[in-house]
Image (tube, grey):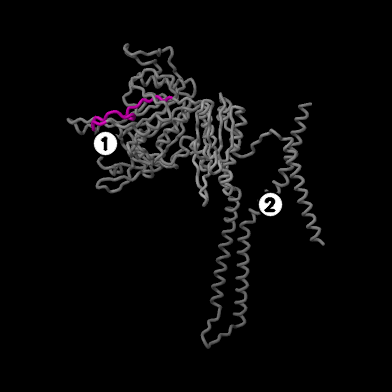
Amino acid sequence: MRGIDRLLVDRVGLLAVAAIFLVTVALSDVLLRGLRLDLTENRLYTLSEGTVNILESIPETVNLYFFFSDRAAADNGYLRTYAQRVREILEEFEEHAGDKLRVTAIDPLPFSEEEDRATAFGLRGISLGLTGDQVFLGIAGTNAIGDEETIAFLDPNKETLLEYELARLVYTLANPSRPTVGLISGLPMSGGFDQTTQQPRQPWVITTQIQQLFDLQPLISATQVMDLDIDLLMVVHPKSLSTATLYAIDQYILGGGRAILFVDPYAEADVPPPDPSNPAAAMVADRSSNLQGMLDAWGISVPVNEVIGDDLYALQVSGTGQRPIRHLGYIGIDASGLDRTEVITTDLDKIILGYSGHIVAEETEDLAVTPLIVSSDRAGPIDATSIGFMSDPDMLRNSFTPSGERYVIAARITGTVETAFPDGPPEVPDTVETSITSDEQLLVSENPINVILIADTDMLTDRFWVQVQTFLGQRIATAFASNGNFVINALENLTGSSDLIGMRSRESYSRPFTRVMDLRRQAENEYRLTEQRLQQELRDTEAKLTELQPTRTEGSTMILSPEQEAELSRFQQERLRVRKELRQVQRGLDQDIEDLGTRLKAINIGLIPLLIVIGSLLSFLIRRRKSS
């Protein structure tokens, strides 16, 4: 009879819970319609301020097409969960952009027009399962003038960059003109004629890639006034710049211009012209570059007499006699030395540098220096003036001592800075036209500057990151390092809007059960000692039982005394007790987790619906009072 009553109570309880759930859903649908509330710890469903500004400033309608093979991925919960995450962010984009952004979800079934459309956009499908069907998970966008931008495949492993990538896609479509990059370079990045080989040089691969994405405008070193129409200034190995050119760079940055600066204490690509009368001239030639006059005014320096050696990141090369050695000056910095919160470096694998320098800076209230690339703690300085005389890279170890310090090789510099020319513009010859006068000089930056400074130029050369082959007259480049991606990411970031530049990678929506993990570790620590004690007791007991067991030989018998039989029985009972306690210890490991699960179920089933009902009623009463 009690069993029947208890079963009846359980059923009534389940019916009551179901009734509360249905009432809660009905009330929330009516009373909370239009209300948006993000209760996640890292505000995963709240767009950043920069994204909101970009969406609210779209001038003309932008169309986004979200291609996801919903049916083909029916059995893949991982992709489906991530696709739902993408949909939710796109819904937030539509909410803030209004009628200026239209999002269309498309399921490209195999052999359908939708699949052909996805392929025409350049989206990339992946094969799942044995069927080999292509699964698409990508975005294509168009604007009012017919421009197209795509994200070929939305990699779930790069989920922290999802909002940034979508915001950049929308910004590019809303602002379709190609950004202009002005280039001042002391290295032959654009090709030219090689005096040594008497042959024309091919442009560096990084130059070709920049030209594919940007309007690259080479600027001669004698430029007096920066063209204010350029969106970004790129300065590479500024060796022997005139004071007038340095002044122009200074004023461009102080006036709000963005810049990426590459300096180097020892640039291997800076090969001096051959001098038959003095073959040793190349060894002592100055291969350093800096913008120290300007950087000093900012409180930043890049020592020109030091390169960084790193015993952890050192790359293996061929030394004397083709024996393999680890080159302290050639370093390949992996993810452990890259800032994973910066959109420029968060998805890079490895940056390879050659004889790089390091950035020395003290942050102040007005200036922030954010490291992007840093050495390991097994790095140390090497005298740059001795490198030209070394016939074997292994000689770098003779005077190398790791300092235990991590050196900053690349950094983002933001904040308020002063001019390097407080006494006025430099004197300019009468033969040079200039429109700048001392009355127009900027002594302090009008707005916070945004500059990326890199203490190495060899990372731009082909041999440090890309292998180039010629096939049927075409140059085919295969990257083996992320140097090119780093530069392109930096250029795209700096040429975007200030809202896009300020964005950083977000937290992942995938969160492990850290509380459960903590409980399991705590339980294991608490029970480990007990288990070890019981295991030792069990081993001792079984050893004594083995000693007490009668040793029988064929045709012989051994009779135990009553005391021995009693001792044997006691040890057998003790073994049963110890084994029972061990089983209880194993069950105890999961007890706290089961208790936590019970409490969570009670909160989710009972407390949360009750709070939603109360909140719904309060919201309804407040709205009714305001409307009356």
Residue labelled with disc 2: 598
Image quarter where the N terminus lies is bottom right
Crowding at dot 2, Cα within 10 Å, few <14 / some 14-19 / many 20+, comes out as few
Measured as percent of width and height from the top left, residue 96 is found at 61, 29
Measured as percent of width and height from the top left, residue 562 is found at 62, 82
Mark 1 or 2: the one toward you: 2
Q: In the rendered view, does 574 fall on the left or right side of 125?
A: right
Image quarter where the C terminus lies is top right
Residue labelled with disc 1: 388
Q: Quadrant of residue 65?
A: top right
Measured as percent of width and height from the top left, residue 335 is found at 44, 42
Residue 465 visible from this viewpoint: no
Which span is picked out in magenta?
180-199
Amino acid type, callout 1: Gly
Measured as percent of width and height from the top left, residue 254 is found at 44, 21
Q: Label 1 to label 2, Cα distance in Å?
A: 71 Å
Q: Is residue 198 magenta?
A: yes
